[in-house]
Image (spheres, coloured by chain):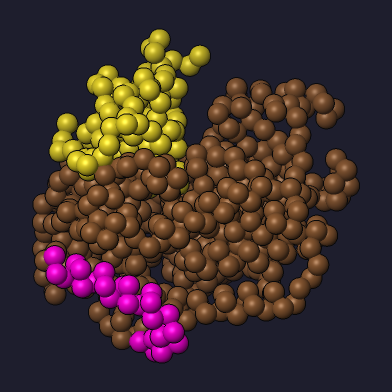
Amino acid sequence: MTTRLFRKLPDAHRDHDITLMVEGRPTRVKAGESAAAAALLAGIAATRTHPVSGAPRAPYCMMGVCFECLMVIDGTPSRQACLVPVREGMRIERQDAVRRLSADHGPS
Amino acid sequence: MTGQITGFDLVIIGAGPAGMAAAIAASRAGSAVLVLDEQATPGGQVHRGIEPRMADDLGIEPRMADGTALGRDDRDGAALVETFRASGAICWGDACVWQVERLAQNRLAVEGGFRICLSRHGIAHVITARQLILATGAIERPVPIVGWTLPGVMSVGAAQILLKTGGNVPASRTVIAGQGPLVLLYVTQLLKLGIKPSAILDTTPPGAFGRALRHLPGALPDVAQLARGLGFMAAIRKAGVPVIRGVGDLKALGQSHLEQVSYLAAGRWQSMPADLLLLHEGVVPHTHLAMSMGVAHRWDGHQLCWRPVLDDHAQTSVGGLRIAGDGGGIGGWRLAVIDGTRAGLAATRALGHAPDSAAAKTALRRKAARHVPLRRFLDAWYRPRDAVLCPADEVIVCRCETTTAGDVRAAVAAGCTGPNQVKTATRCGMGPCQGRECSLTLTMLVAQARKITAEAAGHLNIRPPLKPLTLGELASLSGQAATNA
């Protein structure tokens, strides 16, 4: 865990807030935001590890170009998190270099 | 809807300023128009999330002295979106287009036309269109530097999207490095919201402004835009944000995330601690989809990027396929609106829904021509450094496959003559982003190594699917395949 890179402006109204889970921790975001934004707001430093080098990676472009934000969303791996709109109760998790062959993330 | 082939007169890909303007023009002429966009709501990146932002307070508005949220652009953008929504064009958000192909003449009872394959909410759709307009806009130019893959390094555009969509601002030590109008705009927006970055590292090479000056007289009629830029600079100076000029050899350093930024300025190596580094070296046309359809592209020596070959009516080398807005060459969003209108009208004329109006065409051409001199000035002023275009050997070029500039140069030395051979030899451009973040650098490295022009070096071949899709999505098309059989 490192320093949080982004925060919400204090005057933001809470009317349309959504609560979802980032790495099992509840995080509040606005409707219309992306899963990648939620991960950044939750303070996740690396959203995946690189499949070639194992190096930590994080969202870079936030507009669907770079594919750095691939994450496990509601159990489905390799989603472009910056293009996935947030939903109440959504589960957002880091993506490991080599996909875990567990019941959670295994190939279905 | 699944399993049905739905036909439209005109399909427009991209609901940014150009796509919306094209849809408005064509709908008014009576064409049946469908607009597709990857985002949930229209606006493009420049007016990203403008509908929810106007409807829901993100905390941006109350902090603006003049009460204009993100500025005048936002207000004009909201008006454009409103006109678009009322135009009668159908708009599908959350639509991920993964393949577009030209139909054989007379197949499916349309004259030529196009087949557009897309996924939406996990279900694949196939749509046909008699005419097609690509309004795919711009992407930020890749900024390959040491450490640009570290968590904590992002683009300025990415940070601005976080602001526009959720009222999110940098929370810790933030360094902004690069050049161009977006850097000035974003920093000014942050200052208005009470956020002060640690420093701006201005990468404009010494003498660039002087070289751009010969384009200034032509740009003077665009005095409002120039004044706006000067206003941004004055605001940054007044706020006391440290601006370090002539920055080169920028490096992002850290173990598992960004810790420090180092750079060369005034002949000295310097460094500063940072949690967030935002990079920007201008924007380039997003040509991926057009290239996948075999549209002819030429290298633009002013903007240092590929742009599709277009005639006066936005027509590409592929019949019935037009390109409007920044995807056809960077001109900014206000020019994109004019461009989109031209393309939309041209498409309706091709459909036989509107008569040819020479007067209207001339008026639009004149309006568009007014934007050119300012763009020439900006292109010359903010030309990226050679080291950004052709990075040092140690720098990762392809983020997906971690291919370095040295790997690319070695492949060329071993006999690879173009980007496609280098891709085969090194995997550069073979990862999930399919070369979106490396193909420009790849072209320029090949050109540099072989001492040929970028035009002669060529570009990566782009092949569908343009986005990864699941077997489930493909399977959802099976009903339709049976119908076609």
Q: Is residue B204 above or below residue B406?
A: below
Part of the protein shown in magenta: B213-239
Residue shown at the point (47%, 81%) measured from the top left? B373
Which residue occupies the foreground of this view, A83 or B75?
Answer: B75
Q: Quadrant of residue A28?
A: top left
Does residue B190 appear anywhere in the picture?
Answer: no
Task: Answer above or below: position of A30 versus A105.
Answer: below
Q: Residue at x 58, y 67 (%)?
A: B338
Residue A1, horizontal then vertical, whole percent = 17, 31
Q: Chain coloured yellow: which letter?
A: A
The one of B383 and A55 positioned closer to us in this rendering = B383
Instruction: Determine the residue positioned at 57% across, 75% down.
Output: B368
| Residue at the spot 55% in from the left edge and 29% down from the top edge | B121
Residue A48, x across and y down, in percent: 32, 32
Which chain is brown in the picture?
B
Does the magenta-highlighted stretch encompass residue B220? yes
